[in-house]
Amino acid sequence: MKANDVYRKTIKFVWLKLALGGCAIIFSIVLGLILLGISALSQNDGVMGFSLMIWLGASAGGVGVTQYYIGYLLKAGHIAVVTHLVKTGSLPEDQFAYGRQVVKEKFATAAAYFAVDRLVSGAVRQINGTLNIVGSFLEKIPGMESLVSFARTFLNIALGNLDECCMAYTFYHAEQSSFKSAADGVVIYFQNWKPILKDALKTAVIAVVISGAAWFLLMFGIIGILGVLGVPGILGLLAALVLTVLIMMVVKSSIMDSYTMVCMVCSYLQVAPTTEITFDLYDKLCKLSSKFKSLLQKAGEAGTL
């Protein structure tokens, strides 16, 4: 099944993430209007500055909580449903209930899910750090700067979704320990880096083009609206920048990140089930990443998840 079809069939998760982010944005706008009214009535620069600080902190906190905590758990359920669809070719009747049930059965608690995901994410960052050292060396060669910068963009997208791929593998092999499946998942990912990174390049180009166009259109649109509302120049530009950042955070985490995740997980699950693991890769990755070594050690402990 193609990634676009999987994305379309599981888009309920995207709409829910977008709705949660939208609530945070509405909260930010309403709070901003209230604080703007208070500042206008007071006609005091100190009150305006304090109101601005409150608005920035509350807006960032609201978006952060909805997108990076609640959204994090939604992503786990989304991965479970995507994995089920790719594996069986069919969707569960109630996607949200199925996602919640599978995540709970596999990890028992959100803390257990976070524990595995943090180890995988840490291992990815360390391995990516090694690749960045190579990139820094290549950047010193005349004419290589732009090429290395673009290469890092899609490598970061690909490696940034490694934890999602490994989580999908834990759902695919529900009979195994979560730590064992996650460790196997990392090895399988790097064994199949050529076809997976090929798909990552396509995804990176789409993400960069769409995000860039959306950023500029949204920024200028908000500046125009604030200008019509009579918001002062510098304050209007600052408010437009903050609102653009908040909205793009929501759009990116809800729509673009979900699309990237689905594409990478589908690409990964096309090769993972039939891959014969090269066991010497475990040692090589352990040398590159202490987090991967820790993940592998936990996989070998008795009584793991």
Image (spheres, helix red, strand yellow):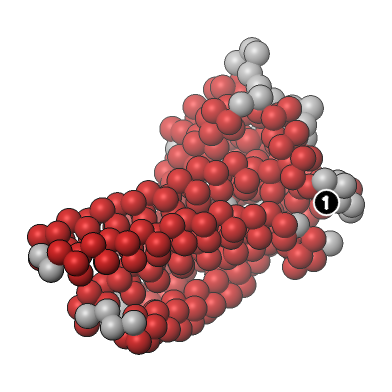
Q: Quadrant of the N terminus?
A: bottom right
Q: Is residue 281 above or below residue 27?
A: above
Residue drawn 82% across and 52% down? 86
Would you say 182 lies left or right of 11 here? left
- Place residue 288 in its image quadrant: top left
Judge whether residue 39 can be spotted in this image: yes
Residue plotted at (46% across, 61% down): 25
The foreground one among 33 and 130 is 33
Q: Position of residue 17 (x, y in %)?
A: 60, 55
Residue toward you, 205 or 77: 77
Q: Amino acid at mark 1?
A: Leu
Q: Is residue 118 above or below residue 211?
A: above
Q: Where 3 sits versus 69, above or below?
A: below
Measuring from the top left, give residue 113's x and y in whole percent. Answer: 59, 32
Residue at the image position 57 percent from the left and 65 percent from the top: 256
In the rendering, at what x and y percent does residue 132 appear? 38, 56
Residue ranking furthest to the top: 302
Q: Nearer the viewer, residue 215 or 194?
A: 215
Secondary structure under the numbered disc 1 in the rendered image: helix
Q: Which residue is mark 1?
A: 85
Q: Is residue 166 visible?
A: no
State which quarter of the image contains the C terminus: top right
* Label total for image: 1
Mark 1 Cα shell of 10 Å, populated few (<14), some (14-19), many (≥20) = some
Q: How far across and how far down the image is residue 303, in percent?
A: 65, 13
Residue sitting at x 86%, y 51%: 91
> Residue furthest toward the front?
41
